[in-house]
Amino acid sequence: MGKRLSRAAIEEYRRDGYYFPVSVLSAGEAREYRERLELIERDLGGPLRGVYRIKPHLLLTWLAELVRHPAILDAVEDVIGPDILCWNTSFFTKEARSPGFVSWHQDATYWGLSEPDVVTAWVAFTESTPANGNMRVIPGSHRTQVPHVDTFHPDNLLSRGQEISVEVDESQAADIVLQPGEMSLHHVLMVHGSGANPSADRRIGFAIRYIPTRLRQTGGPRDSATLVRGADTYGHFEPEPRPETDLDPAMLALHAEISDRQARILYRGTEKTSF
Ligand code: NI
């Protein structure tokens, strides 16, 4: 038994590369998170775009709280150990009746991190089901890195429209189905993707990327991360402060620098230089 996950659950994560569902928020709390997001979207005049897609937990206090939520961190600790950095966050929002999709890919391909010991906690603010474009995974695919190509397809929600360049056997795919307030955990090498959202409501997921403090950034400029549990005795990442108010001007300035560095890592080798 781990802090949060059973021994069987931890074994399942190691064998298959993912585990779900883990209950994190009540349905009412998930609703409140959605409302907070939609309030900010109204202020900004639409869905989060550009730099707001990268590390919004540095700009919004309620996301700074969510990345530190004990119910999430206890499960994350069970798979990557007790000294935990939050390396990145982003929303994966699919508007109602929208064509946006995510091609089959492995997250590790462009992130530049020294080891594939990275776990994503994907927290559902709305339900995520086959009706609205839930994430699909290929069980056991996290043991091998496979080649990718960039497509920059306009409806692809990924930074480079990257997709796996060898055939993916979709008959093996499993659906990650979540109710509001539940999360899934997945390994950075697991092959995953998702389809469009033809339903009448938005599908909103918040992806949090956690790493153990010993990892390094090998893909370019010095990187930064937020220590959310334990101690960082390595200092491989510049520590990030916690926002005290939403969209604080000083945090916006720091965040602009950080997202510029992230863009240089994620887009290296291409002509694109910003989000
Ligand atoms: Ni991904």
Image (tube, grey):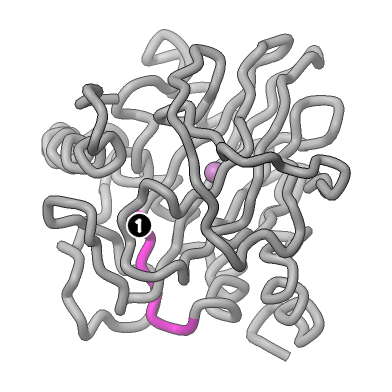
Locate residue 200 relative to residue 265 in the image: left or right. Answer: right
Which region is colored magenta?
A: 81-87
Q: Residue at x 73, y 52 (%)?
A: 182
Residue 113: name its quadrant: bottom left
Task: Confirm whether the magenta stretch covers residue 86.
Answer: yes
The answer to whether 109 is drawn above or below residue 160 in the figure is below
Residue 112 locus on image (x, y percent): 31, 55
Locate residue 6 relative to residue 54 in the image: left or right. Answer: right
Where on the image, by quarter, is ligand 1?
top right
Q: Is mark 1 within 8 Å of ligand 1?
A: no
Residue 183 can be seen in this image = yes
User: Which three-letter amino acid code belongs to the residue tagged 1?
Assistant: Trp
Task: Confirm whether the magenta stretch covers residue 270.
Answer: no
Q: Nearer the viewer, residue 254 or 136?
A: 136
For label 1, the crowd category at 10 Å Cα-Cα, with few meaning under 14, some 14 to 19 and many 20 or more, is many
Residue found at the far front of this picture: 166
The answer to whether 113 is drawn above or below residue 61 in the figure is below
Per the image, the residue denoted by label 1 is 87
Q: Which SS class for mark 1?
A: strand
Residue 36 locus on image (x, y percent): 52, 31
Residue 133: name its quadrant: top right
Q: Residue at x 63, y 32 (%)?
A: 204
Q: Residue at x 43, y 29 (%)?
A: 150
- The N terminus: image quadrant: bottom right
The answer to whether 45 is drawn above or below residue 124 in the figure is above
